[in-house]
Amino acid sequence: MSADVIFDLLKNGSAVDHKFRYVDRIGDQQVSKIKQRSYVLDALAGDRNDLMALRLAAGLTACSTRSPCNQPFCPMCRHARQAKFANQVKARFAAVPQDRLLFLTVLLSVHYDAGQIDAALVKSFKRKFRNLLFHQNKTAAIPVRMSGAFEIEAMCADLSAHKAVALAPLGHDKTRQDTFFLLHFHAVIDRGSLSQDQLRSLLIKKHFPHSYQVRLQATHSDKTTEENLAKIAGYMLKFRLQHSDRISFSDDDQTGRKSSYGSLYDLAVAKKVVMAVNACGQFAGMVLKTGS
């Protein structure tokens, strides 16, 4: 499909024209989802010479319930995949005692060129997680298991001094003022027969050794296991295109603090994130299930 054909398709298939695709699918959120879709189209369709981005935009425009585009940044397809993933996670972990379930975050690498984040890089980290658990589970009374997803987040240069130091081993350069891209991993994890401290040591020793690189959190005690799993699964596949102040450290003031979400990325930055996720294999490439 040529650039001219794609531009005609985009011109004749605006997000506003496709409101019906969201009715009864996303309910009251349909207006915001349509805006998100239009924003992604604007990000992808700005360069007539970028045929790959234009093809993604064309797929997003042509998406329907009968022929979904299955793109992570299509609100309808993401919504459907989040629900499917939540059901898979609940089926896998619903019978696990809640005190064995943890929410894992691992910060992996910082890149100033989003094009460096591709399928080969993600596969290398998948291999590391699989090898780690394979060797652990060979002698474990109860195996460690995880289901998770990789995420690419664009971050502004104006980090606190402490966070800049923490991200330095992962590739952050405090002398640079341009946007950078953080590849990280979220997972729900059944610690098996390990204690939380033993699991933390397993992850950190030789694998993810830098300060603040690994974070393990207990699930919410005021929610059922199923509620916790559904919320975590949806969070892991959010594919957000907004700035946040989500990464926290042990010496931050956490009193009354919640995840804060700010402005949308600039269109050029949003496009880089969308294209990087596409280069990683979209939904299938970003998801990892490991452990027996």
Image: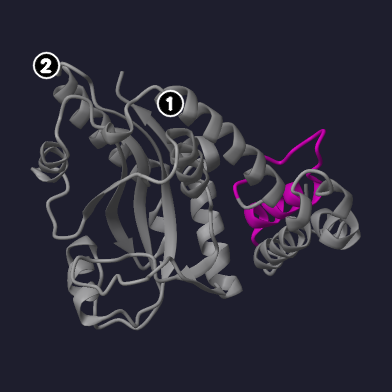
Look at the picture and state if 94 lies above or below 69: above
Look at the picture and state if 196 lies above or below 10: above
Residue 173 part of the magenta-drawn span: no
Give the structural element (helix, strand or loop) at label 2. loop
- The residue labelled by disc 1 is 94
Q: Is 19 on the left or on the right of 188, as rendered?
A: right
Look at the picture and state if 267 lies above or below 37: below
Residue drawn at x 78%, y 47% is: 1
- The residue labelled by disc 2 is 139
CB under 8 Å between discs 1 and 2: no
Look at the picture and state if 115 lies above or below 278: below
Q: Residue 152: image x %, image y %?
A: 43, 56
Q: Residue 170: image x %, image y %?
A: 22, 61
Q: Residue 238: image x %, image y %?
A: 53, 51
The answer to which of marks 1 and 2 sits earlier in the sequence is: 1
Q: Residues within 10 Å of mark 1 (few under 14, many from 20)?
A: some
Q: Is 242 on the left or on the right of 111, as rendered?
A: right
Instruction: Report which quarter residue 241 is drawn in.
Output: bottom right
Q: Residue 209: image x %, image y %?
A: 12, 51
Numbered mark located on residue 51 in the image: none
Residue at far front of view: 222
Q: Is 244 on the left or on the right of 203, as rendered?
A: right
Q: Give the range drawn in magenta.
A: 50-72
Q: Which of 114 and 214 is in front in this view?
A: 214
Count of numbered circles in the view: 2
Residue drawn at x 69%, y 66% is: 39
Q: Disc 2 residue type?
A: Thr
Image quarter (top left, top right, bottom left or bottom right) of the C terminus: top left
